[in-house]
Amino acid sequence: MRRLIAAAVVVSGAVPALSSAADFASVQRGYAVYAQVCSACHSLKQVTYADLGDLGLTSAQLKALATGATVTDGTDANGQPIHRAGRPDDHLPSPFPNEAAARVANNGALPPDMSRLALTLDGHQRYIERLLTSYQKAPAGFEVPPGSYYNTAAPGRLIAMPPPLHDGQVAFTDNTRPNTGQMAHDVAAFLGWVAHPHLEQRRRVGVSVVLYVALLTLLLFFLKRRIWTHVD
């Protein structure tokens, strides 16, 4: 499934109105990093497959992504879960069936959902990037408990997540060199984009509203002048 998701990053050419083409490319690459690395442990529970259309994916690619997932949709008369292929309006599935399974797979730690991580963390996406690039060897005298890792950006300089990124780990379709710093920057950009759903659409609507109000104000001004010029 993750290979299918990564393959869908080859987009159709539709470019959302991000602040620049470079930002858009970074968000796309960040999605590849999430799909190929982060999605093994972290969910995006508040993101639907349809939301990924703003990355430039075609309807066919979105449908392929969704149908490649198995979704639990209620229970049958015997209380057994009903499974079906995913649809574009479904949310991206969690890598674990429940919290207990997630903790067992991660030495007791619970990987946080990434849907709004860039909003809830102090420092937002910049902090995410710094956290991913701040793994170091612990200095002499600093005790690192089993199952923890030394990270200068983490609270107390300890983190339960092992270093997730390594040079050359992800294949980018635009020939960008996938070193650790680049991947950290790109996945942080993607998580920043995810944390502000439909931001670009809201910006476009806001600009349209401002232009409409400005035009209406101008018309009312000239109408007022025309009316009052005939009044002594």
Image (cartoon, rainbow, N blue to C red):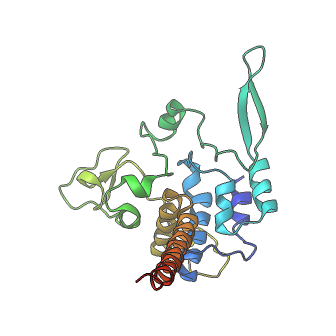
In front here: 17 or 217? 217
Residue 48 image offset from top left, x and y in percent: 64, 50
- Whether residue 153 is visible here, answered yes or no, is yes
Residue that extends furthest to the front in the rendered view of this protein: 232
Residue 164 image offset from top left, x and y in percent: 48, 59
Q: Is residue 161 left or right of residue 7?
A: left
Residue that extends furthest to the left in the rendered view of this protein: 141
Residue that extends furthest to the right in the rendered view of this protein: 60
Name which residue lies at 47% across and 41% down.
Answer: 106
Q: Is residue 69 left or right of residue 120?
A: right
Residue that extends furthest to the top in the rendered view of this protein: 78
Q: Quadrant of residue 70?
A: top right
Name which residue lies at 72% across and 66% down.
Answer: 57
Name which residue lies at 69% across and 68% down.
Answer: 9
Q: Quadrant of residue 128?
A: bottom left
Residue 171 image offset from top left, x and y in percent: 64, 72
Q: Is residue 100 left or right of residue 157?
A: right
- Whether residue 19 is visible here, answered yes or no, is no
Relative vertical location of residue 74 with respect to residue 26 in this rendering, above or below: above
In front here: 219 or 176? 219
In front here: 208 or 88? 208
In front here: 38 or 72? 72
